[in-house]
Amino acid sequence: MNAEQHHDHATDAGSISLITGASRGIGRALALTLARAGGTVIVNYKTNRDLAEKTVADIEKAGGQGLAVRADVETTEGVTALFGEVARYRGRLDHFVANAAASVFRNIVDLGPHHLDRSYAMNLRSFVLGAQEAVKLMDKGGRIIALSSYGSIRAYPMYATLGAMKAAIEAWVRFMAVEFAPYGINVNAVNGGLIASDSLEFFYGLKGMPDMRGVLDRVPARRPGTVQEMADAIHFLLGEGSAYITGQTLTVDGGLSIVSPPFFADAGPELRLPPRPTRDS
């Protein structure tokens, strides 16, 4: 694909996007962001039809077009069926966002082989197989985005199964970026920190987990991110402004991944960060 052909990549107004797990959270926020610019969004879901159909209704209210497709991407048949529906609905694709994720949260010594198999199938295999299918439909180039999390680069309780899969996803993003570049397809990941969502509440509700407020005190931004902030980062990577960005992982975490002990939150008053200086101070 030559330089002129790269400019054929659709703007939001004419874009066709597939988002897995798009009935809630980050996927829903992204779907509505694309819809507000006039895009068409295929909303993939596994079980909650009502939530998915509400997302489609909201997409249409926002000025876009939408279709809800039930498919379990944990299975190879589900991935094939999902992209078959995309092909029948629009015949092509501009954006594939691998957002769906699921895991069991246990210590490593308590994991069974079926936990490993399901984590691989749901989180990693669905992304790789989905990307293979997406390429076939991206006749004008396109964008592939995978959602990751800070468990891909940091270790903490109960997250090994999902964190390891996210690390593998980020590696696959780099390999895909190289192989898909000649097709005019950019591949990137967005790595989220503590993002306010049902998933975050569930994880910090696990027995024995520390209070989230104490954790947030150690994040430089001193707050969780929002699903819209994640959606905005993904939206940038889907747009024309990111045409020369591929094979990268964009971190959206309020500075969480750059800090380490000793934390300012734990320091004595002599080391606490002072108020912002002003010219009069």
Image: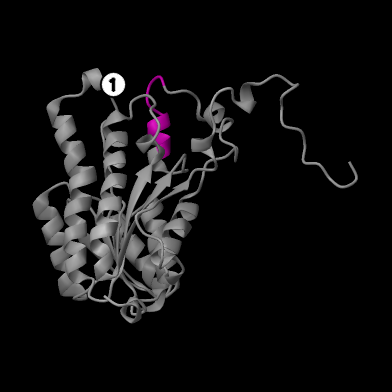
Q: Amino acid at mark 1?
A: Asn
Identify the residue at horizontal 37%, vertical 35% (top origin): 151
Q: Is residue 160 left or right of residue 251?
A: left
* Residue at screen point 19% across, 50% down: 126
SS category of the residue bearing label 1: loop
Can residue 254 be seen here? The reply is yes
Q: For label 1, count other residues whose C-alpha is less than 10 Å away and answer few (under 14), some (14-19) or many (20+).
A: few
Residue at screen point 16% across, 71% down: 87
| Residue picked out by circle 1 | 107
Figure check: 242 above or below 120: below
Quarter of the picture containing the N terminus is bottom left
Instruction: Please state, as top left, top right, bottom left or bottom right, where the C terminus lies in the image.
Output: top right
- Above or below residue 262? Residue 279 is below
Does the magenta run of residues contain 124? Answer: no
Position of residue 67 measured from the top left corner of the image (x, y, whole percent): 26, 68
Position of residue 44 in the picture relative to residue 279 (left or right): left
**Residue 102 visible in image:** no
What is the x, y in percent for residue 160?
30, 29
Residues rendered magenta in the picture: 200-208
